[in-house]
Image (cartoon, grey):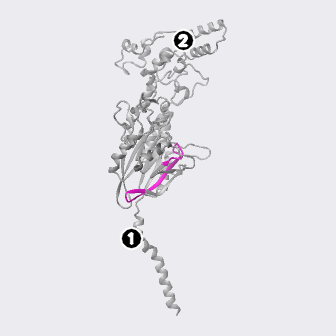
Amino acid sequence: MRRPFASLLVFLLAIASIAPLILLASPAATAQAARPVLNLFFSSKRRGEIENCNCQSVAQGGVAFEPVLYAQHGRGRPELRVDAGDWMDGLAATHPVRAEQSRYLLRALELLKYDVVNFSLRDAQLSHGWIEHLAQSHPGAVAPLVSANVYRLDQPDQLAFPPWRIVERQLADGKTYKIGVIGVTSVEGALPGMETVEGTPDIKTAGYIVRPPQERLGAALAELAPQVDMLLVLHAGTYNEARQLAQRYPQMRFMVTTAMAPRGVGVYFFEGPVAMMFSEIESGRKLGMAALRPRERNWEFELRPHSFDVVPTPNVDPALTALVEDFKQRSTAGLKPFDPRGVRAFAGAHRCYQCHDQIYQSWRNDPHSRAMQRLVVEGEQFNPEHLRRATTGFGQLGGFVHPSQHQSQMLMGVQCESCHGAAFEHASIQHRLANEPNLAPAERGELEQKARQAMPAKVVPEATCLQCHGPQDDPGFNFERDYERVRHLK
């Protein structure tokens, strides 16, 4: 009597062991396995950072560590990678090393396979030539840039970049979906050197005109919506502006913004039907992620937005590691310490301004003052041969040494002392005369004489100009004609 029972027990156990396999092979299980999901990785406010922050508490950041993290969090599903803007360092307009680092960051985003990168007001610090020179050597680094409301300064009716990109992804259901990604930036938060265009809310920068995003976003959404299956907006600006745009254009459905979320909001917030996603921290130290799935004619979250730390890992990407090392070598090439005695022979044009303000303003409007900017645009700000003709006192004691050094940054451009000689002693005496009104007449007279002796008035000879405008460097130079263009009153 026990044998039939034992046989039945063996049979039931066998059925139980293969039941999961039968379940997996069922139509319901197949549909579950083929569920279409798209991973969305997002970032913003990278601020030119490509290296680990070396923070004492928790070391974070570093583009070379990101690929491993994408693989860990992505689980092999199709991906879309976007950046909402503010990828340029805030000092790029005045700091040649930071400008170059921002250039390397765009190259890093190319290696990281970023699909779309928004161009923000902060990113508009440098002239359009900066982008054009990068595009000549690394077109893939510039290709992801979009903006629906940034125009070229030299062609105010022409957008500087495409207003959007359409990215196609085939998901697990075998269908190919089109995702339209639009970029816009606020006109609020202008940086030094930017100004409002008179009579308008537009902002003028070194190379761009940035117009308010509201109307231009509406036009872009209306044109793009019929062409795609999903709309995503990249926004650079304030939290209040992001909410206003979401209220005005609910059809966008998803937004990634550089705005700082209010306390307690977290990584995302719903404004009506629009999911607004935030980057919790800047400088590439955290990345955001969400998983999206299509549902009928809409999309929803399969995995709600969250963030993860970018931390050092044993496995680093070799191409990105090489890129970071290349930047380090390039940005420190020729770096030498200042004279140990702290010699200050050159004052810098900012000191000349204190007594010669009209001449200073005349110089500021002259191309000589912007000589270093041209090198930054062309990526030649570390080339000694070019630095000789674009800085003050290069190769001389107390003169320009390297773009990374603070004292050298005060001597960028062909300044007053390039033609009239080093003037630190003269400027120091004049500063004392201006700020010590109670000096005895005899002492004041003695100081005034020393100031004149330290910097006697002189006519700039042709030989001075030929140091930079020689036959090889500037064959069209004519001293008598060209000197008149820059001559100013004493």
Q: Residues within 10 Å of mark 1 (few under 14, many from 20)?
A: few
Per the model, the C-alpha gap separating discs 2 and 1 is: 91 Å
Q: Residue 274: image x %, image y %?
A: 45, 51
Q: Residue 412: image x %, image y %?
A: 49, 25
Q: Residue 105: image x %, image y %?
A: 46, 41
Segment tinted magenta in the rendering: 277-299
Q: Secondary structure at mark 1?
A: helix
Q: Is residue 485 above or below residue 3?
A: above
Q: Is residue 437 left or right of residue 360?
A: right
The residue lying toward the viewer, choosing from 55 and 147, is 147
Q: Is residue 294 magenta?
A: yes
Question: Predominant secondary structure in magenta?
Answer: strand
- Mark 2 vs mark 1, foreground winner is 1
Residue denoted by label 1: 27
Residue denoted by label 2: 455
Amino acid on which the number 2 mark rests in the picture: Met
Query: Visible in this render: residue 288?
Result: yes
Amino acid on which the number 1 mark rests in the picture: Pro
